[in-house]
Image: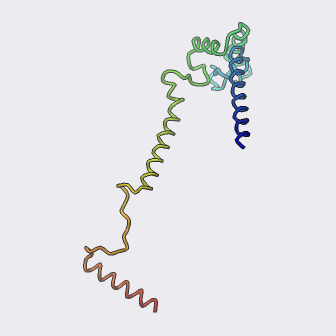
Amino acid sequence: MSRRIAIGALASLLLSVAGLLGTVARAEAPTQNEVETALTCQCGCGLTVHSCNHVNCGSALPLKKEIGEQIAAGRSLSDILSHFENKYGEVILSAPTTRGFNLAAWVMPFVVLAVGGLMVVVVLRRWRSGEPGEPPPVSAVPSSAESGADRELRARLERELQERDT
């Protein structure tokens, strides 16, 4: 059984390395589709350059032409995206960058999940251990500080229960 696990782990590692090499190779020669998908059309449709559905879009058509020229010049995907970001600003990128304040858009969901998970663990541990803050358990044994009325009610309850059983 452990041999199968070792073979599976080795195969997984090899596939991961092959995938990494594939992305490195693709980073040097991006396709038109990859670049068009990474950029937002500036006509106001809110779609990527690749999926803009306007027939004669005044923004997508020139951008597609410029993307083709950039690819023909042999530029990498990151170089092309940097070119368009410098030309149009960060608004042209279809995904937020991972620098500056935009880093919060990538990091905060994971921070919130971690804090929420930690809070759940803390609450569950307190419930299990019975730490202060939890109400004391109800005792079935009457306390010595019972008032006379409580004793009378308890005696009445016992009488009624005995009458019911008979």
Q: Is residue 123 left or right of residue 97?
A: left
Instruction: Determine the residue positioned at 37% across, 54% down.
Output: 131
- Which residue extends farthest bottom? 166
- For the N terminus, the quadrant is top right
Colour mode of the rendering:
rainbow
Q: Relative to 54, does residue 84 appear above or below in the rendering?
A: above
Q: Relative to 118, does residue 19 appear above or below in the rendering?
A: above
Horizontal and vertical percent for residue 69?
71, 9
> Which quadrant of the view contains residue 144?
bottom left
Instruction: Determine the residue positioned at 61% across, 13% down.
Output: 84
Most foreground residue, 163 or 1: 1
Horizontal and vertical percent for residue 47?
66, 26
- Which residue extends farthest top? 73
> Which quadrant of the view contains residue 34?
top right
Q: Relative to 130, does residue 154 appear above or below in the rendering?
A: below
Most foreground residue, 100 or 7: 7
Horizontal and vertical percent for residue 87?
59, 11
Q: Is residue 26 left or right of residue 135?
A: right
Instruction: Determine the residue positioned at 56% across, 16% down.
Output: 89
Q: Is residue 108 left or right of residue 26?
A: left
